[in-house]
Image (cartoon, rainbow, N blue to C red):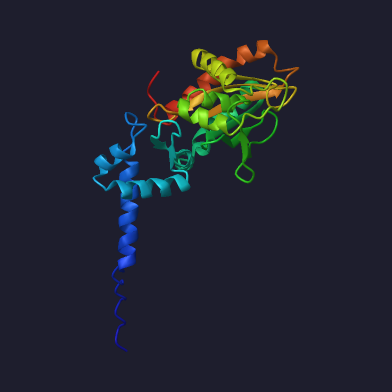
Amino acid sequence: MAPIAPAVPAAPSADDKNRIQSYRRMMDVLQCFSTAARRLTLAQIATATQLPRPTVHRILGALKEIGFIEQDVKGGGYMLGIGLYELGSLSLANMDLHREAQPFVDQLARQCGASVHLGIFNGHAVVLIERGEADEPRKRLSARLETAPIHCTGVGKAVGAFLPDEVVQRVAAEGLQGYTPHTLTTLAALQRDYAKIRKRGYALDNEELQLFVRCVAAPIRNASGRVFAGISVSGPADRMTADLQQQLAPIVVETAAAISRHLGFSGG
């Protein structure tokens, strides 16, 4: 029997070529933005991409629909959308942070005799990907992810305090739900608390998500120095007193710093 010749891939159709060209143009638009050019006008994007304004306007409209671009209603400028932060967070999660940080989570739980939570920011809240308990085997959260709001949890605020201001404002615009009488429900109050967190290097949750539960948390940085995750210890309020929070804070901060160094961060 004669050997069967391998199938020759079909040449891309005209429709395929058009779709590929559209995707490339979308990438051209997205790549116009940078840390130095966070907000751009339609004219600036058209000039940078050398595309006709109607084409750029159509691309921006499509990117807005899927959350990759947002438009300033007052000024008319365009910014990268929160959908990209979500994808970036998923990419960071794929670095297996939970695997890299697992020994630190276990050690912190034993050292503090409290529950430990590790989480990554997903664009809206902090997704808890690892938990350690002082008195029982480690429990992975892969089967049931939980989230920690960035305005009323220790690990959430530890991350939120270091997010770009425009991201915080977008999350706040979605609503700062009040869970207890101690929850910060206004952007102004949250920003004041964030300023304190940045100054001292750690966050506190004093019964802000759940009554009779307190915690202390610290931010984790990636190799480039960006805060993208956090770690916290928590316990019942009658045990996790203000004095104990102050005693545990340096331990939590050093653990977060050790994880950051393990991930490649070499800054102070």
- Residue 158, image x, y percentages: 54, 24
Report the quarter where the N terminus lies: bottom left
Report the quarter where the C terminus lies: top left
In the image, is residue 157 above or below residue 199? below
Look at 63% across and 25% down and name the residue there. 152
* Left or right: 143 in relation to 74: right
Q: Quadrant of residue 209?
A: top right
* Residue at the bottom extreme, as displayed: 1
Look at 30% across and 76% down and name the residue there. 6
Q: Would you say residue 229 is visible in this rendering?
A: no
* Left or right: 151 in relation to 4: right
Q: Would you say residue 69 is visible in this rendering?
A: yes
* Residue at the top extreme, as displayed: 243
- Residue 166, image x, y percentages: 46, 28
- Residue 210, image x, y percentages: 72, 26
In the image, is residue 240 above or below residue 22? above
Front in this rendered view, residue 189 or 199:
189
Count of marks, rendered view: 0
* Left or right: 213 in relation to 145: right
Front in this rendered view, residue 129 or 55:
55
Look at 33% across and 44% down and name the residue there. 29
- Residue 5, image x, y percentages: 29, 80
